[in-house]
Amino acid sequence: DAKTTQPPSMDCAEGRAANLPCNHSTISGNEYVYWYRQIHSQGPQYIIHGLKNNETNEMASLIITEDRKSSTLILPHATLRDTAVYYCIVRLPLNSGYSTLTFGKGTMLLVSP
Amino acid sequence: GAVVSQHPSRVICKSGTSVKIECRSLDFQATTMFWYRQFPKQSLMLMATSNEGSKATYEQGVEKDKFLINHASLTLSTLTVTSAHPEDSSFYICSARQESSYEQYFGPGTRLTVT
């Protein structure tokens, strides 16, 4: 699986949009970009994933650049409960026998009042 | 959504004893389950992949005789830390792969403290 690079930490004011970047310059054509987050002392929580197109769900939006070498996770209106470590992961298609989740160091997002 | 549970959520044991951690997929079948370990201020590290009815596959550097994995049914995998030592104190997290979608869902984790 391709490796990812994320800033170690970011701050965001409550109610503002949080934009978390991720670089994955060695991503292969069939690899997906997944985002998970981990609130302190809990298991990881799935947020969103995409291949080429931008994606949006009830939690967040995922913007993938045209060359697919980077992406941005957007939390449109961050709340204090969004304080967590956010992991950007590149992985093979789910039905691939080699599709595993390899966690990097992630970005610690601190949302402040 | 798919739910994965772990039991216990927190356990304290004495050095030299063994501890068993259960991972259950509550509303789906999981042929494959994964066990991760997370030390303080570090990321999750995959320890092993368990497949129902067969032997687990361990990552490099993980002692298979110390971390015994049993995946006897499509909804249950267990991790037994044998002869635990203080350096085994960690946050252990399991995940289960749903057969119909191949999506991977995580449990809430088990905090192990060895005194």
Image: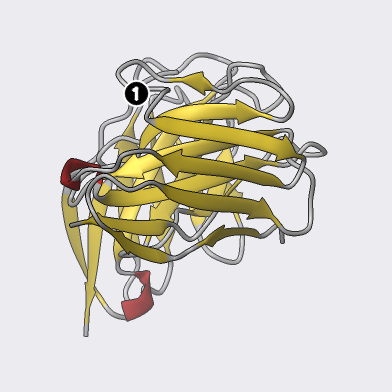
| Vertical arrangement, residue B76 with respect to residue B69, above or below | below
| Vertical arrangement, residue A56 with respect to residue A113, above or below | above
| Vertical arrangement, residue B46 with respect to residue A106, above or below | above
Residue positioned most to the right: B100
The residue lying toward the viewer, choosing from B21 and A20, is B21
Where is residue A64 shown, x and y percent of the image?
Answer: 47, 37
Where is residue A80 shown, x and y percent of the image?
Answer: 31, 79
Label 1: which secondary element: loop
Residue B31 showing in the rendered view: yes
**Is B6 on the left-hand or right-hand side of B88?**
right
- Which residue is disc 1 drawn over? B62
Give the residue type that dot 1 points to: Val
The residue lying toward the viewer, choosing from B68 and A67, is B68
Q: Residue at x 37, y 76 (%)?
A: A81
Q: Residue at x 45, y 18 (%)?
A: A1
Q: Residues within 10 Å of mark 1 (few under 14, many from 20)?
A: few
Q: Residue at x 64, y 24 (%)?
A: A93
Q: Coloured how?
A: secondary structure
Residue B54, quarter of picture: top right
